[in-house]
Image: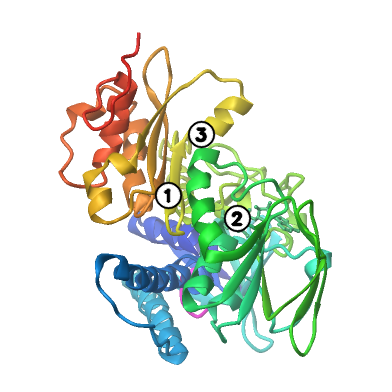
Amino acid sequence: MAKKTDLIVVGAGPGGYTAAFLAADLGIKVMLIDESPRPGGVCLYRGCMPSKALLHVANVLTEARHANAWGVEFGEPKIDLERLRKWKDNVVTKLTGGLAQLAEQRSVDYLQGVATLVDAHTVSVAKSGSAVETVRFDHAILATGSRPVLPEALATKSDRVLDSTSALDLSRIPENLLVIGGGYIGLELGSVYAALGSEITVVEMTSGLLPGVDRDLVNVLSRRFGKIAKAVYMDTQVINLKPGKTGVEVVLDGPSIENRQHNFDMALVAVGRIPNSDTLGLDRTVVELDERGFVKVDSQRRTAEPSLFAIGDLVGEPMLAHKAFHEGRVAVEAITGLQTVFEPKAIPAVVFTDPEIAWCGLTETQAAKDQQLVSVARFPWAASGRALTLDRPDGLTKFIVDPNTEQVLGVGMVGSGAGELIAEGVVAIEMGATVSDLPLCIHPHPTLSETIFESAEVFLGRSTHVYRPKRK
Ligand code: NAD
C-alpha cells in the first residue's frame, strides 16, 4: 500500500530541510526523504560545516605562527590528527542531531532511503536491504544538490587522490599536495592542508584564481597564496594523473611549466560540481533540464511539471546553501498559495580562505561584461585602525554604485572576517540604499565594519581616514 502525504521533499540538505520545516510549521503534512540517517546534506556532512571547523583550526595555527611578530612565541604546534578528526566529526554530529530533533518536534516524517520519481505524483524509495516504499504526494520539492565533477583525465580510484569529501576525512597530512582547481574548494581546503603542514601547489586552468570574482579582491588573496604555496600555476592543466605506490605522477601543461613531470604525495581534485538531476527519474515527468543538467524552474521554483518544485544546487548557480534556504521558503510559500517570488538583488558569496573574500550584488567584472556604467569606491584596510590592531591591513572594501541614482548595486570585500561583514552590504542593496545612507548609520568604533561606511565616504569624497580629491 502506498503511503500518502501532502508534500515530499527529496534531499535533506539546507534547502530541503528548510522547506520541510517551514511546510510543517504552516500545517502541511510533509515527508523528508534522504539517504542519510539524519538531515544535513552535503553542507553539514561533507561541505560547509566540517570545512569551516578545519578552517578555524587553520586560522588558529596561522595566527599562532604569526604571533612571533608581536613578541609572542608558541613554538611549533603538535597536531593530533585523531583528536582533530573527532572534534570536527562531533561538530557535524551535534548539528545533524539538532536537525533530527527539530524534524521530530515538528512531526516531519523522515524517511531514510533513495528516492526515484515514478510519475509526477508518486515516488519510490529504496531503503536499506531490498525494501522499497512507495509514496503518493500532491507536491514535491526536489533538493538533491550536486556532486563533484571528475573529468576523465583526473578520474582514478586511489586514496592518494582526494575530492572535497575525502579531503575532509583528514586520513593523513601529505608531505606535499597538488591542488587541482583554484576555486572555492581548492583554495579553502588547500589553505587547511597548508596550515597543517603540507607543501601545496595549486594548478588553475584559467588565467586567475576564483574566475569571475573581481581581480582587486582576488589579488590580495593571490599574494597570500604566493606565500603559503610552493607554486601557483595559472592557465595550466593536468593532462595526466597516475597514482602509484610512492605518490601521484602528474603531467602539467601550461605557459610557466618548465618541467612537465611532477610527483606529489597526494592530489586534491576540486574542479567544480554538477547537479544531481540524472538519478531522480525526471525522464518520467515533463521536467526540463538546461544544457548543464540544471532543472529549469520559474520564479517560484516550479518546474515544467506543475506538482514538482526544485531548489538549490539542482537548479543552478550560485551553488550556495543560503540560496537554497531562501528558495526552499519560496517554494513552500508558493505551494501554500502565498504570493511569493525568488528575486534576490544580492546573494552573498564568501570564500572562507585567509583572508576571506566576500561579495554581493553586482560585481565590477559583471558590470564590465554587461557594459554597464558604474562608479567604484575603495577603502583600503591599511587605513582602518581596527585592521592594524589585528595586524591585518591586507584588506579592501569596495562599493559598486549606480552613477546616476547613487544606489548601491554591489559590495565587495577581502580581509580577515569579510564573510561576517558582507551581510551589511546585502541589507543595503536589498533595502535600496543609496551610498549616502550608509554614513548616516553610526558604525561601532573600532571595528572592521567601519570600512563599509568609509568606502561610502570615499565615494562621496569625504572619508576621514583616507584623502581623495573631491568629486566634481
Ligand atoms: P569552482 O567552480 O569554485 O572552482 C573550480 C575551479 O577549477 C575553477 O577555477 C576552474 O577554472 C578550475 N578548473 C576546472 N577544470 C580544471 C582543470 N581540469 N584543471 C585545473 N583547473 C580546473 O568549484 P569548486 O571549488 O569545486 O566548488 C564547487 C562549488 O561549491 C562552488 O562553485 C561553490 O558554489 C560551492 N562551494 C561554496 C563554498 C562557499 O560558499 N564558501 C565552499 C565550497 C564550495
**Residue 174 appears left or right of 440:** right
Q: Residue beneath label 1, please?
A: 329
Q: Residue beneath label 3, please?
A: 363
Label 2: few (<14), some (14–19) or many (≥20) C-alpha neighbours in 10 Å: some
Residue 38 sits inside the magenta stretch:
yes
Residue 11 appears in view: no
Numbered tag placed on residue 183 in the rendering: 2
Task: Name the N-terminal-most of marks 3 and 2.
Answer: 2
Dot 1: what SS? helix
Residue 404 horizontal/vertical position (percent): 41, 12
The span picked out in magenta is 36-40
Observer-side mark, 1 or 2, equals 2
Q: Quadrant of ligand 1?
A: bottom right
Dot 2: what SS? loop
* Image quarter of residue 389: bottom left
**Image quarter in which the N terminus is found:** bottom right
